[in-house]
Amino acid sequence: MSSIKKVEEAPPNLDDLDFEIIKRLQTDGRTSYTEISEELGITVGTVRNRVQRLIENEVLKIVGVVNPFKTGSPSVTIFGMKVRLNCLDNIIKKLVAIPEVRFVAAATGVYDLYVEVITSSNEELYRVIKNKISQIDGIESIDSSLLLEIYKQTYDWGVGS
C-alpha cells in the first residue's frame, strides 16, 4: 500500500448536518460557530464537535485562499506531466516535498499528473525546474503553461448538492 496521502471520497457517515456546516464554511471560513449554530438550530458544541471531526478525518481544511499575483509571486505555472506509472508514487512523494509546488493531482487523459508551481520570478521557476523537478526519475515529459492572471478561484462548489 502506498504511503502517499490521497484525497478520497467522503466517508459514508457524513450526514446532511455535516454538509450544511461545510457549505457555510466554504462560503466564509471565518463564520463563527455561534452563527452556524443559530442558522441551523443546533448547539455551538455540536458545530464545534462536527467541525473538529471533519478536520480530523481530513474532510475539511479551513485556510485563507491567496491570489499569488497580489502577493509578490507573479510566476504561477501549471505543469502537465507524463510519467512512468511504475514510478508514480515516488514521483508524487518527491513533488509534494518541493516547497514551491502547491498542487499535485493524478489524472486520466493526456497527462498522468498536474502540478502547480508558484515562484516569485521566472528565474526562480527555472531553478525549480532545473534543480528539482528535472532531477526526479520517471518523469517522461513535461508541458507547462505560465498563468497570466486568475479570474476565478473558488472553493464553494456545492458540496452535498
Image (cartoon, rainbow, N blue to C red):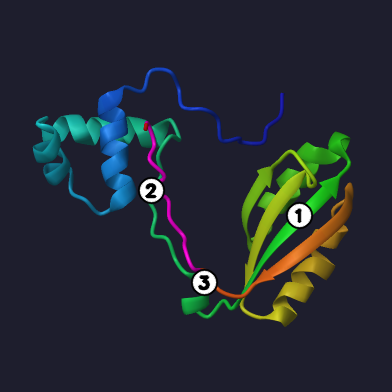
Residue 87 part of the magenta-drawn span: no
**Amino acid residing under circle 1:** Gly
Instruction: Report the side of 65 relative to 74 (left or right).
Output: left
Instruction: Report the side of 161 relative to 33 (left or right).
Output: right
Instruction: Report the side of 86 relative to 120 (left or right).
Output: right
The quarter of the rendered structure image containing the C terminus is: top left
Q: Which mark is residue 80?
A: 1
The residues colored magenta run 151-160
Residue identifier under label 2: 156
Q: Earlier in the sequence, mark 1 or mark 3?
A: 3
Q: Position of residue 121 (x, y in %)?
A: 66, 81
In terms of secondary structure, where does tag 2 sit? loop
Residue identifier under label 3: 68
Vertical order, 55 against 99 (above or below): above
In terms of secondary structure, where does tag 1 sit? strand
Closer to the camera, 78 or 136?
A: 78
Q: What residue sits 73% from the left and 45% below the top?
A: 92
Residue 156 part of the magenta-drawn span: yes
